[in-house]
Amino acid sequence: MPEHTGASLSRFQELLAELGVPLDVQLFELALTHRSFAYENGGIPTNERLEFLGDAVLGIVVTEHLYLRFPAYPEGRLAKLRAAVVNAHSLADVARELGIGPLVKLGRGETTTGGHDKTSILADTTEALIGAIFLTGGMTKAEVFVHHIFDPLVEQADAIGAGLDWKTSLQEVCANRGFAMPTYRITESGPDHDKRFVARAEVDGVEYGEGRGRNKKQAEQEAAALAFAALSETSALADELIG
C-alpha cells in the first residue's frame, strides 16, 4: 500500500489494505496530481489519463453488476440506476468519505479557492485512483474496490424509487399519504466562490432536518432524504402499531 509523504494514512489507504488491493506508489502519486499542480511544476504528467481509464473501468464494473443484479429491469431503468450511482456528486462523496481531498496535489490558485473539496476535482481524482488500481492489480482488484464502494450505492438508489432522487421519492410518499407537496426553505452563506447552502424540507407544516451542500440542488436532495426517512419511519411505526 502506498504511503503519502507528509500525511497520515487516509481512510482510502486504510481501505486498500483491508481489501488487499495493491496500488503502485508512482501511480498513486500520479492519480493525485491535478493539472493545476502540474502546470506550476514544469508541466509534469497529470492524472487526466488515469481519470480517462478509471471512468471506463468504473462504468463496466457497475454496468455488469446492474445487469446481473436486476435481470428483470429494462434498459432504461438500468441506465437511470447507473446515472444515479456513477456521477460527479456520488464520486465526490466517495472521495470525501475516504479522505481523498487533502491528498490531492493542487496549484496555489485551486488551493486558495477550496479545490480540495471541489466536486469536480474530487470526482476526477476518484476515477484516476480507480484507473491506478486497475493498472496495478488488474480488473480483479479493481472490481474488489469498485464493488465494495458502489454496490451499496446501487442498492440505495434502487430503494429510492422510480424517480431515483430523494425529492421525487418524497413527493411520492406525500401523495400516497395525502399530504401537500413538500416545499423547501433555502439559506446560503459564504463568499461567491465558496457558497454553502442549507435546505429544510417542509411537509404539512413540519420541517425535517437540515440538508447541506455546495449548491441548492444538493442541499434540497439531502433535506428531502431526511424528510423521506422520517416519514417512512413514522409510517412503519404506524403499521406496526396497527398490526
Image (tube, grey):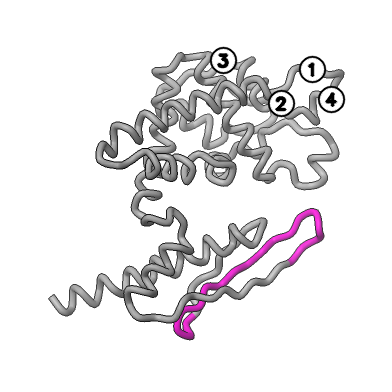
Residue position for label 2:
33
Residue matched to label 3: 24
Q: Is residue 146 above or below residue 178?
A: above
Q: Nearer the viewer, mark 3 or mark 1?
A: 1
Magenta stretch encompasses residue 199? yes
On the image, the x and y values in percent for residue 97 come to: 53, 44
The residue sitting at 47% across, 82% down in the picture is 206
The residue under label 1 is 44
Q: CA distance from mark 3 to mark 4?
A: 23 Å
Q: Who is closer to the viewer here, 57 or 148?
A: 57
Q: Report which quarter residue 55 is drawn in.
A: top right
Q: Amino acid at mark 1?
A: Ile
Dot 4 falls on a residue whose secondary structure is helix
Q: Is 158 on the left-hand or right-hand side of 120?
A: left
Compute the Cα span from label 1 to label 2: 9 Å
Q: Which residues are magenta?
A: 189-206
Query: In the image, 29: left or right of 169?
Result: right
Gap between marks 2 and 4 measured at Cα: 10 Å
Q: Is residue 83 magenta?
A: no
Q: Residue at x 39, y 43 (%)?
A: 154
Ranked by sequence position, the earlier of labels 3 and 2 is: 3
Mark 2 and mark 1 in contact (Cβ < 8 Å)?
yes
Q: Which residue is mark 4?
A: 39
Q: Earlier in the sequence, mark 3 or mark 4?
A: 3
Q: Nearer the viewer, mark 3 or mark 4?
A: 4
Identify which residue is drawn at 25% across, 70% down. 236
Residue nearer the viewer, 82 or 5: 82
Where in the figure is residue 155, as x and y percent of width and height?
Answer: 35, 46
